């Protein structure tokens, strides 16, 4: 099994997904809405990066895109459970 961290640091989609998760953890821990705003910014950036990659057949199904989508799914599921 490989780690998603190297993938997360090498491509914009999972990188912004990782920062989305971190920002919302900080929001939950501190209650400071600046972290929520930062999380929404990273959510938009991750979506843009994935959409751009999906337009390129060579990049459409890569570990980076799958990891980026995984981070957004984890965020959505966690948000629904809280």
Image (spheres, rainbow, N blue to C red):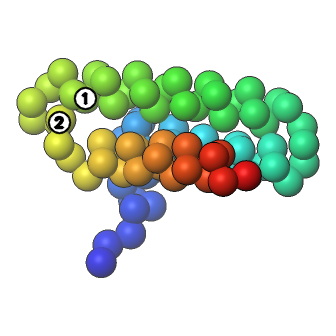
Q: Hey, which residue is sitting farthest bottom in the picture?
A: 1
> What residue appears at the point 28 percent right and 22 percent down from the top-left corner?
52
Name which quarter of the figure residue 50 lies in: top left
> What residue appears at the point 78 percent right and 36 percent down from the top-left corner?
35
Q: Earlier in the sequence, mark 2 or mark 1?
A: 1
Q: CA distance from mark 2 to mark 1?
A: 5 Å
Q: Residue 21 has which mark?
A: none
**What kind of element bears circle 1?**
helix
Q: Look at the numbered discs 2 and 1 and tell me whether their residues touch, using CB distance below 8 Å.
A: yes
Q: Which residue is mark 1?
A: 53
Q: Which residue is mark 2?
A: 59
Q: Is residue 82 above or below residue 1?
A: above
Residue 67 in view (yes/no): yes
> What residue appears at the point 30 percent right and 48 percent down from the top-left corner?
66
**What kind of element bears circle 2?**
loop
Q: Residues within 10 Å of mark 2 (few under 14, many from 20)?
A: some
Q: Nearer the viewer, residue 69 or 77?
A: 77
Picture coordinates of residue 38 (x, y %)? 70, 30
């Amino acid at each position: 099994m490989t780690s998603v961290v190297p993938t997360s640091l090498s491509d914009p989609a999972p990188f912004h997904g990782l920062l989305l998760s971190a920002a919302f953890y900080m929001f939950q821990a501190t209650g400071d809405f600046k972290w929520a705003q930062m999380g929404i910014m990273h959510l938009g950036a991750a979506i843009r990066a994935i959409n751009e990659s999906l337009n390129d057949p060579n990049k459409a199904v890569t570990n980076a895109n799958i990891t980026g989508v995984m981070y957004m799914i984890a965020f959505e599921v966690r948000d629904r459970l809280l």
